[in-house]
Image: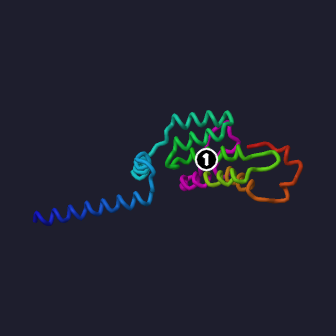
Amino acid sequence: MQSKISQVAGLALTIAYAVFIVWIYATEPRSFREVATSAEVASGTYQINQEKFNSALDLFRREQFRAARDEWQRADPAQGDSRTQFYIAYSFYREGWGRVYYDQELFKKGLEAVNRAIALTAASPLTVDDPNLRMHTAAELKAELEQGTESSLSDVNPLKVLRTRK
């Protein structure tokens, strides 16, 4: 009886260790902090750093978009918060928007971020109530970013310089 219990316990520990090793290889953490963050995400206790998020929001409102994105990356290292990903995408939009042309690379990165935000809120559409923004849903932002990455005849329209940034 005693040997059966030790065999089952040994088997359970071996399986748990194997799952841990596979999880480490799958997530490829670069530091122990990333291991802890991944564990929080897996257990459902993940939360962003609200102080860094607010700091990034202040930078965003002062039109320091790259610094804001860096701060949001620090606030949400697991890229698990849809609101943060929405703001990251919006900062790519604002930085890449131009009166004469759009920065295609920044818009593509913005599309990646807004797609992450949409994937994180698959159950209900994401709406951000920020009076400083002209687009409040991820779908609006995605449409605007997609429009900016497409080439069309309207790109050579001289009246394009009169439009306003959202």
| Horizontal side, residue 49 vs residue 68: left or right | left
Query: In the figure, is residue 29 to the left or right of 149?
Result: left
**Amino acid type at image mark 1:** Phe
Position in image of residue 157 (x %, y %):
88, 52
In the rendered structure, does residue 136 fall within the stretch colored magenta? yes
Say if 88 sits above or below 153 in the image. Answer: above
* Residue span colored magenta: 114-140
Nearer to me, 135 or 23: 23
Q: Nearer the viewer, residue 114 or 12?
A: 12
Name the residue located 43 percent from the left edge and 48 percent from the top edge.
31
Q: Quadrant of residue 65?
A: top right
* Secondary structure of residue under mark 1: helix
Quickly name the residue at label 1: 86
**Coordinates of residue 47 in the picture (x, y in percent):** 46, 43
Q: Residue at x 44, y 46 (%)?
A: 46
> Picture quarter containing residue 53?
top right
All told, the count of numbered labels is: 1
Residue 86 location in percent, x, y? Answer: 61, 47
| Identity of the residue drawn at 52% across and 42% down | 74
Q: Quadrant of the C terminus?
A: top right
Percent position of residue 119, x then y = 56, 56
Question: Seen from this angle, which residue lies furthest front?
Answer: 30
In the depicted structure, whether residue 39 falls above or below residue 5: above
Residue 8 lies within the magenta run:
no
Residue 14 sits in quarter: bottom left
Q: Please name the residue shown 56% across and 41% down the image.
A: 72
Residue positioned most to the left: 1
- Within 10 Å of the Cα at label 1, are there few (<14), some (14-19), or many (20+) other Cα atoms? many
Scheme by which the image is coloured: rainbow
Q: Nearer the viewer, residue 21 or 132?
A: 21
On the rendered image, what quadrant is the N terminus found in?
A: bottom left
